[in-house]
Image (spheres, rainbow, N blue to C red):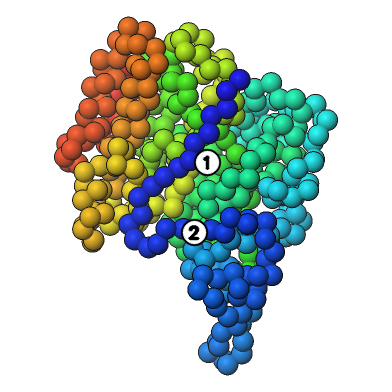
Amino acid sequence: MTPFTQQATKKEAHGPAQTSNDNADGPLNDYVSGTGMTGGGSSTSNRSDGLPEDGRSILLNSNNWDNLDKLAIWLFYEADLRVQGYHIMGSSFYKTLGKGDFNVPPAALDPFHPTDLESFVHHFHPRDLLSTRTSSTWQPGVDICFGIDRFQRQVVMKAVPNDTPELAVLRQFSCPPLCADKRNRVIPVLDFVATKHDFVIVVMPAWGMCWQLPPCGNMTTRVELAIKLAECLQLLHECGVGHGDIQPFNILINHVDSRNFSETSHNDFRQSHNIEYTYIDFGSAFLFPPGTSCVGCPRTIPPDNISSPEQQLAMESEAIPVDLFAADVYNFGKTLEGELCAAFEAYGEAHIPDPKEYKCILREMTNEEPLQRPSAAAVLKFLLTIR
């Protein structure tokens, strides 16, 4: 059994890198008093009516996240989340609930609509419920925290600012009619928890990050993977959504990241389970009204080996508009290309039969000229012909 762990990276269009205090379990009182702020600070400020504003309201709002300890938001809202049935990572409940309980529920038949009696993901020989959650204290940022729900399933909680495309997209794809669309592979949302600050806590099931490890053992599973993700990309674009940051770290799989690792192309685990994939992290997304062009100036882009030439140019020179849909197709193509190259390296090209047509569509998707790339719908149509 080999655990795979990865950490997401992306290029920022502007603004300082996010910082944190290594003492993630430090008391929130430091932040209420203002001592937890970079460069000092004050617990009060003058409002327009002359009354002092509670320091917590200032410090926890999204415009101050760069100055917060990683657990500041989550310690502040820990009690509220507990009332909703969620326990944050590191709490006594998180570290003890489920120990010795060997009744691990089966994986959801439909991972996008799990029942209360199903696990979110496929587990690899879990000892008990406690073993189905991460024991790591790693946190990708101040706005994200791992936890468990009332059924002791691993969840991811994300603080998403109000009036952002990310929150709008997650709400839109969590409601009828899109939540019932079979092409919808946006990460399902379990709960939208309101707060007294300028953000909503979005609760999502924790899926595995290592969707491409080990690489697909044959073209059948590879093309099926590509079709599922292309279907969702087509739906996103139909609904006016440009993801803006498609890359390996923003795709998940409904299987934990611990499983048998095979250095052969045989016995692909994807053929043994009902495997699904999902897109996450719409923090770079654009939401275009119907009938408008899909052009915008990106705020962040994928890493250099995934981002398109026009995305990289836009990062170097401000206010250069980019066709977000064409950029999505390029990023998607590069992501699939990376998985195929990893398979060649792991198994040898002789064990990957007849990838010629698949490589052809990847070349078209990664054309340096945006206007020469196929649409997401055209990509899907081609993939269905080689299924």
Label 1: which secondary element: loop
Vertical placement of residue 166 versus 136, above or below = below
Q: How crowded is mark 1: few (under 14 residues within 10 Å), some or many (20 or more)?
A: many
* Quarter of the rendering containing residue 204: top right
| Quarter of the N terminus within the rendering | top right
Q: Which of 203 and 183 is in front in this view?
A: 203
| Earlier residue among tags 1 and 2 | 2
* Quarter of the rendering containing residue 365: top left
Residue that numbered label 1 is attached to? 187
Instruction: Identify the amino acid type marked 2.
Output: Thr
Q: How far apart are marks 1 and 2 (CA)?
A: 27 Å
Residue 126 position within the rendered picture, expressed as x and y whole percent measured from the top left = 71, 25
Q: Nearer the viewer, residue 384 or 331?
A: 331
Vertical placement of residue 362 versus 385, above or below = below
Instruction: Identify the amino acid type marked 1.
Output: Ile
Using residue 117 as the reference point, say whether residue 319 is left or right of it.
left
Q: Which mark is residue 19?
A: 2
Residue 180 position within the rendered picture, expressed as x and y whole percent measured from the top left = 54, 38
Q: Can residue 241 be seen in this view?
A: no
Q: Is residue 4 visible?
A: yes
Q: Nearer the viewer, residue 23 or 371?
A: 23
